Amino acid sequence: MSNAPTRAQVASPTPLVADPQTIPATEYLSNDAIDRRSGLNKREARKQRKAQQALPTPPDTSSETESAKPPNNPPKARKPRPANTEQGASIPHSLTLAMPPGNPVPLLICSIGNPGAAYANTLHSAGHIVTSYIAGRKSYQPFTKGLSGLVARPDNTTFSLSLLGGYTKTQGGPPEDDWTFWQSLSLMNVSGVGVKKAYAAWLAEMRRRTSPSQEGRLVVVHDELESALGKVSVRESGASARGHNGLKSCQQQLGGLKWWRVGVGIGRPESRDPNVVSRYVLGKMQERERSGLERSAPGVVDALRSIAEK
């Protein structure tokens, strides 16, 4: 015989009873709502509740008496436990330094590579290619000489046209991201000297403009050999340079300063012969390789925003 409910059973469901064991605390029914569902008028309902409150509380409540409690008398919510101040000791140190959302730290984003037309458009200068691409897509000012290298800053100027005054140039609001892009003009193996000078000059300039205690963070964008083309990695300054001479130079020059590294993968040749690897990283890129680096831009931007909010 089938246990499926008949049409009459479906059409006439059992009246809903609020069970405090199954209904969340935020969804308890009000007394008036329960009275209406029970078919009681307000006067009869008040009499029943008053009589219920007058009854003595039994010393031992069984499951049967618990189920007999009216649904409009849910158990009192437990008071929240006081915060355990000792739990902070188990939180990783990096998380305790997290910046509040919407208050990111300004960044100086330095790309390292090799200068000049001979090394332009090569895999070893992937950092320059990616930062140039991001700066262009974010409508930054063109890269010009500054801070011992090439600098691109946010362009927040706007132009308005009037019949009498013609075009008027005004400064807009703050940029979406408080970033300054910088590109090294020295050879990769000694790029740390320029990065150190640029960071010191940028930090002093920013603090003169804002406040002496303003924090600013340094990020170095570089090529990452052996990582897949366009793969983005983020590491802190103390991590192994993995044979990257530009990173070694930065570590030597910056000493104990905390900074971040954003690597962009360029792959590697099958051979590990140094001459083959050198020709690979210093050879001119194909269009496919350049497109792969440019497609890494959203991942680099996400990494930079994460660093600014740590």
Image: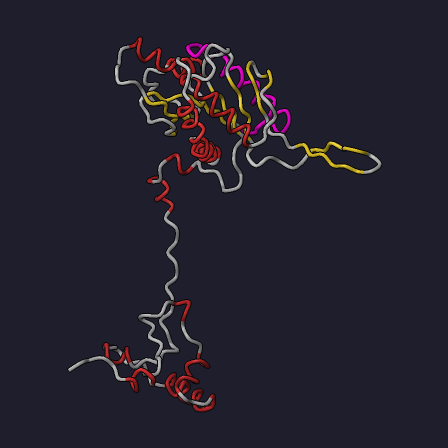
In this view, the residue farthest toward the right is 164
Question: Against 71, is 43 above or below?
Answer: below
Q: Position of residue 62 (x, y in %)?
A: 23, 77
Residue 5, quarter of picture? bottom left
Q: Which residue occupies 45% across, 90% down?
A: 41
* Way the structure is coloured: secondary structure
Quarter of the image holding residue 156?
A: top right
Placement of 248 over or under 18, stated as above or below: above
Q: Pinpoint residue 228: horizontal percent, then vertical percent.
A: 33, 27
Can you say which quadrant of the picture contains the C terminus?
A: top left
Q: Is residue 284 magenta?
A: no
* Camera-nearest residue between 21 and 152: 152
Residue 231 lies, in percent from the top left, at 37, 29
For image coordinates 31% across by 20% down, the residue present is: 268
- The image quadrant where one finds the N terminus is bottom left
* Of 63 and 208, the residue lying toward us: 208
What range of the chain is rendered magenta?
Answer: 187-215
Outermost residue toward the top?
275
Q: Main secondary structure of the magenta part?
A: helix
